[in-house]
Amino acid sequence: MAHKIMKRFVHTLLAAVTFTIATLGAWCGAETIRLAAQKTGTFAWELAVIRAHGLDRKANLTIEVLDLASPEAGKIALRGGNADVMVSDWLFVSRERALGAKLTFYPYSSALGAVMVPASSPIRSLADLRGRKIAIAGGPIDKSWLLLQASLKQDGIDLKSEATIAYGAPPLLSAKTLDGEMDATLNYWNFCAALEAKGFRRLVGMEDILPKLGAKGRIAMVGYVFDEAWGDANKGAVARFIAMTRAAKEILSTSDAEWKTIAPLIGASDAATLHAYRDRYREGIPRRSIADEEADARILYRVLARVGGRELVGPAQELEPGTFYHAIPGD
C-alpha cells in the first residue's frame, strides 16, 4: 500500500513539474540556451530524456549543446561568450566573483565520489589507509581529497604524509585500481559506481564525512553556472530550463526502463554497471532548498579554504555573496 501511495505521489509530482514547464513556456516565446557540456557527462543522459519526451519543446526552449573535451573548456566558452550555461562547482563561481566576474550557481547534482577498495581488502576504516598506496583523481586540490584530509586531521591523521599518494586522471586511476596497483582510490562518483559494479567496496562515501565537517545535509557541489547579468535578463528562460531539467531528473528517478534506453550513452557494459550508475545518480538528485544548500556551502568553503589555500579559492576566505542563484520560484 505504501509503495502504491509513493508511486502515485511521484507521478503527481512529475505531472505538476511538466505542467509548470508547459505553463511557463506558454507565457514566453521560444528561446535558445547555449549549454557547454562534456559529451560523455551526465547531462548528456538528461538531454536524451529531455529530447525523447519533448520537454524542451514544452518549455519553448531550444538547447544548443557545445560538446567539450574537459571542464576547463567550458570555463573558456563561458568567459568568451560562446556559451550561456555550463556545469561546474560553487568554488569556481565564488573564486570568479572574488576576481570580478559575476557568475552565479544553481544546484545540479549532489553525487559525490567515494573511497573504494577491493572487496577482499583488509582496509576496514579510513585510519587503515595509513601506509597504503592511494589513487586520488583530480589532483592535489581536488575538493573530495581536501575534504577527506580535513576530516582525518580531526582524528590526528595526516593522510597526505602518512600514505603514498598518486594523482591522475579518473579513467587512468580507475584502470590502475582494477589492475591491483593501488590499495584504494578516491575517484569521481561515476567511476566509483563502475568499480562498485565490479565488486569493489565503498569504504566511505564523501557524503558520509560532511556532517563531521559541519554540514547539515548532502550538498550539491556541482551546478549550472551562468553570468549573473545574463540570468537577470533571462529569468523566464532560466526558470523554464530548471523546470525542464527537474522533469528529466524525475523521469530518471522513477523509470528503470528509461535507463535501459540511455544505456548506450552511459557506456554500461552490463546490467550491474547500469544499476550502479542509476542508483548513485538518483541519490545525487538535489532535494533541498537553495537556502540550505548555500548555508552548507559556506561551512564547507571555510574548510576547503583552510586546507586548499589561495591556490584553490583565490583571495576570498568566505563564500562570495551572490554565488547561489535565488530567482527560481519555490526555492
Image (tube, rainbow, N blue to C red):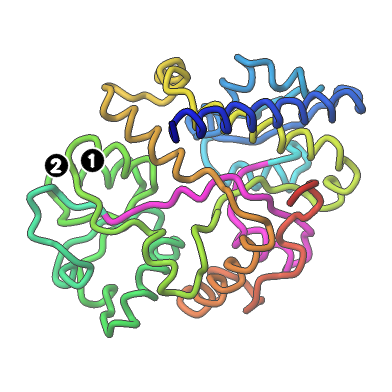
Q: Position of residue 25 (x, y in %)?
A: 84, 25
User: Residue 255: image x %, image y %?
Assistant: 47, 23
Span colored in magenta: 86-115
Q: Which residue is mark 2?
A: 179
The reply to whether discs 2 and 1 touch (Cβ–Cβ < 8 Å) is yes
For image coordinates 69% across by 62% down, the residue present is: 291
Q: Is residue 199 left or right of residue 307?
A: left
Is 260 one of the magenta-colored residues?
no
Q: Residue at x 53, y 29 (%)?
A: 39
Classify 37 as above or below 208.
Answer: above
At x 17% / y 62%, what residue is drawn?
133
Count of numbered circles on the image? 2
Q: Secondary structure at mark 1?
A: helix
Kindly identify which residue carries mark 1: 175
| Residue type, mark 1 in image | Ala
Tell me the distance, in whole angstroms, between the alpha carbons under discs 2 and 1: 6 Å
Residue 101 on the magenta span:
yes
Question: Where does the image place residue 246, in percent across and percent down from the top left?
Answer: 64, 35
Residue 190 sits in which quadrant? top left
Q: Is residue 324 above or below residue 299?
A: above
Residue 295 in the image: above or below residue 64: below
